[in-house]
Structure formats: C-alpha cells, structure tokens
Image (cartoon, rainbow, N blue to C red):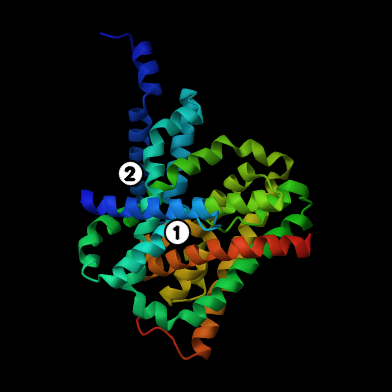
C-alpha cells in the first residue's frame, strides 16, 4: 500500500482529481443555491469558484495543476457556443419579429458598457493600460482579449475583468429586472447577453428558455459590435 | 449522441479554421454557431435529433465557466492598486448596460408595435 503522502502527491497532479473536484463543487454549489431559494448572490458559478479557490488554497495547489483537470470542462465552451444555434433556430419567428428592438438594444447596450466603464474608471483615477483593458469587458473572452491587445490594454487583466463582468451581470440582472417589473423575456435575455456575455447567458438559460435564446443572440452580436466599437470609442475618448 | 457531438465539434473546427485563416475578429465557435444555424434552416428535421445534445450542453452552461472563474482568483494580483476602482466601474457599468439594453429594446418594441404575446 502506498504512503498517504505519496498517494496524495500522485493524485494532486492527476487530471482526474481536479476534474472530479470541479464537477462536485458545481453540484454542491447548485444544491446550496437551491437551499437558499436561488438567492441572486448564490450564483452557481460564483459559489463553485469560491469553493474551488478555497480548496486550491488549502492544498497549496497551483492553478496550472488545477487546469490540467478542469480543461476538459473548459473545452466544452466551444461546442456549447455552437449549440446556441438550436435555441436561436427554435425562436426564429420571435427573433424575426424583434429585429429592430434587438438592433437598437445592441447598440445602446454595447456603447453604454464600453463608455460607462471607461468614464467611471477614469473618474476614479484609473489610467493607462489598466483603463484600456476595461473597454471590451462585456464581450465574450476570445474577442475581448483580441480587442484589449489592439487598443493597448493588458489582455491578462482583461481576462479577469471579463469573467468578473459576467458574474456581476448574472448576480444583478434578476433582482434589478424583477424590481422594475419587466416581464418581456426577450428584452431581459438580450440585454443580459449584451452586457454579460456567456456567464449572463448561462444565467438566462436557468431563469427562462426564451431569455436564454435571446441572451445567446445578444452575446454573439455584441462580440462583433465590441470588436468594431471599442477601438473607435477609445480613440475618440482617451 | 457521438454523431451529434461530432457535428458540433465539426462546426467549431470549421469556424476556427475560417476565423484564424482569414484573421477575422469573430471567434471560431461564433462562426460555428452561424454555420450550424444555417444547416438547421436548410434541414429542419435535424433540430429534433440535435436537441438532446444541445440542451444537455446548454442547461449546464454555468458549469463550463467555472475553470475560467477559478483562474480569476489566481490572478487577482493583476489589479494592483486599481482593484476597488475597477470593480466599482464593472458593477456600475454592467448595471447601466443591462438597463440601457432592456429600456431600448422595450421602447423600440413599443414604437414598432411588436410587443411579445408570450409576455
């Protein structure tokens, strides 16, 4: 029989351990969210991240080792993005009927996301590459990183800002939109997808299938619009 | 099931090839989404067969963001002294963007008389 310490050092480096931990943490987070009756702060992404970060910290595991296992989950983001075509197709009639509202909301949401982030951060004293890194934060990660680099930002900082934006959007969307009494799931989903990309879309799918479908469209369109608008806004504003 | 996953991966692969090959600003999976959508429009019968795989992936979309989220906690150092200002900007800006999007959507839907029957 292996020594416990030897066994641990083997398991801790094996992808199996951290893949299993990721799935178990998510299931636990989902249970906790259910027990808290889906309180907005009990967001499953946020809870899972806190649980896993605590575990990594307690075991002294570097992120790179964790990602060896977690990459299998991360990889599925690609096919899941392609799969968004199905809800889009199934809602085609309603999407066609909402083309004008979507186009207007896309421009308004995208511009507001870029402009307000830059203006607020600048007013609070952020400048230079850190400020520029903020411009594409509402776009999905691969686009945001490319834009950040193009406008003179720091892609590694943008990566963190993008994920935080998604989690913030998923946490604040439902309480705010409920408080305002907005019941149009198309408008709710679309705005969340534009402002908070895939993490917002994941939240929208948990709340309502129509919101999820429209959120996926909002995310996809804002990826394209941010790539065009962010460099323009940065040049005019800063 | 394997065939359905293979089809999704094939569209992603095609999208990546186009995106990298032509240096487009749109990520490969988003181009894959457009291609798969075009296929569904051309072959409506495919939608039923693809539904289990697609809804399986999408109903647990939150899970797929967990590894990247854990990565954030490993990189909080990149914030430096700007941390509080950046987080404040993110919270306010995300709320403003959601409000601008919802407000504009509803206003234009009302103007064009296209409110949703489904509510």
Q: How many marks?
A: 2
Residue A6 position (above or below residue B27): above
Residue A16 position (above or below residue A187): above
Which chain's residue wears label 2? Answer: A
Q: Residue furthest front?
A: B21
Query: Where residue B87 sits: x, y (%)?
Result: 64, 51
Tell me whether marks 1 and 2 sit on the same chain: no
Q: Which mark is residue B30?
A: 1
Query: Where residue A67 sits: x, y (%)?
Result: 44, 34
Mark 1 → mark 2, Cα distance in angstroms: 28 Å
Residue at image point 60% right, 55% down: A137
**Taking B79 as reference, is A24 left or right?**
left
Q: Residues within 10 Å of mark 1 (few under 14, many from 20)?
A: many
Query: Where residue A215 sits: x, y (%)?
Result: 44, 66
Quadrant including the C terminus of chain A? bottom right
Circles 1 and 2: CB atoms closer than 8 Å: no
Disc 2: which residue: A27
Residue at image point 39% right, 54% down: B14
Residue at image point 62% right, 56% down: A136
Q: Which mark is residue A95?
A: none
| Any part of residue A102 in sight | yes
Residue A133 position (above or below residue A51): below
**Taking A41 as reference, is A11 left or right?**
left
| Any part of residue B61 in sight | no
Residue placed most toward the observer, A165 or A147: A147
């Amino acid at each position: 029989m292996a020594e416990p310490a030897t066994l641990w050092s083997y398991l801790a480096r094996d992808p199996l351990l951290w893949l299993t931990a990721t799935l178990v943490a998510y299931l636990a987070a989902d249970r906790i969210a259910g027990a808290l009756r889906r309180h907005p702060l009990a967001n499953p992404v946020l809870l899972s991240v806190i649980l896993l970060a605590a575990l990594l910290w307690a075991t002294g595991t570097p992120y790179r080792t964790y990602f060896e296992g977690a990459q299998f989950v991360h990889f599925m983001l690609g096919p899941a993005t392609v799969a968004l075509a199905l809800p889009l197709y199934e809602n085609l009639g309603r999407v066609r009927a909402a083309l004008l509202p979507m186009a207007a909301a896309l421009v308004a949401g995208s511009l507001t996301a870029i402009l307000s982030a830059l203006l607020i951060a600048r007013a609070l004293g952020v400048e230079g590459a850190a400020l520029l890194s903020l411009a594409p934060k509402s776009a999905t990660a691969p686009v945001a990183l490319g834009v950040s680099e193009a406008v003179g930002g720091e892609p590694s900082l943008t990566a963190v800002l993008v994920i935080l934006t998604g989690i913030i959007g998923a946490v604040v969307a439902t309480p705010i939109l409920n408080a305002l009494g907005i019941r149009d799931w198309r408008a709710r989903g679309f705005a969340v997808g534009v402002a908070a990309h895939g993490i917002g879309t994941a939240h929208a799918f948990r709340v309502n299938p129509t919101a999820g479908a429209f959120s996926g469209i909002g995310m996809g369109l804002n990826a394209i619009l941010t790539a065009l608008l962010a460099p323009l806004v940065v040049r005019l504003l800063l | 099931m394997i065939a359905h996953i293979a089809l999704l991966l094939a569209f992603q692969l095609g999208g990546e090839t186009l995106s990298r090959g032509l240096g487009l600003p749109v990520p490969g999976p988003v181009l894959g989404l457009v291609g798969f959508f075009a296929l569904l429009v051309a072959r409506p019968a495919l939608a039923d067969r693809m539904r289990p795989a697609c809804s399986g992936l999408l109903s647990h979309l939150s899970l797929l963001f967990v590894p990247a989220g854990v990565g954030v906690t490993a990189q909080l150092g990149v914030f430096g002294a700007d941390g509080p200002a950046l987080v404040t900007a993110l919270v306010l800006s995300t709320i403003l963007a959601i409000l601008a999007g919802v407000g504009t959507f509803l206003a234009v839907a009302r103007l064009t008389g296209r409110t949703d029957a489904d509510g």
